[in-house]
Image (cartoon, helix red, strand yellow):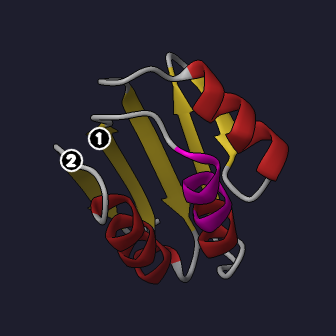
Amino acid sequence: MKIEWTFSMNQPWTIDRVLDFVSIANRYSCQIYVGSQGKMLNAKGLLGIVSLSLSLGAKSSILLQLDGADAQEAFEQVFIHLQSGERLSANVLSHSS
């Protein structure tokens, strides 16, 4: 299953939020990528996500891509985490590969 989700951030990510996001991503075997302006990074790599979070400002648009057997479960957990402190506008495209 492949899922693509675009959302807008209302505020920059804190380091705690980044650490939690990477921790959640690493619980799943599916591929998870996150990016902005055409640059996609592996969501399971802490340094890349820290770098991305520092480059994003408030109101940034983020693309999240998940692909693999447990993509739906991973998406649900990432969505819950991101929703806990953000007001999100999401467009979800889901299809089986």
Kind of residue at disc 1: Phe
Q: Is residue 50 left or right of residue 21?
A: right
Mark 2: secondary structure: loop
Could you tell me how far apart the alpha carbons at marks 2 and 1 are, in whole angstroms? 6 Å
Q: Is residue 83 left or right of residue 97?
A: left
| Rendered image quadrant of residue 53 | top right
The residue carrying pointer 2 sits among few (fewer than 14), some (14 to 19) or many (20 or more) residues within 10 Å by Cα, namely: some
Residue placed under numbered mark 1 in the picture: 7
- Contact (Cβ within 8 Å) of mark 2 with mark 1: yes
What residue is at 27 percent from the left and 50 percent from the top? 86
Q: Is residue 64 left or right of residue 6?
A: right
- Region of the chain picked out in magenta, as a range: 14-20
What residue is at 30 percent from the left and 66 percent from the top? 84
Residue 20 image point, x, y percent? 60, 67
Q: Is residue 3 left or right of residue 50?
A: left
Residue placed under numbered mark 2 in the picture: 88
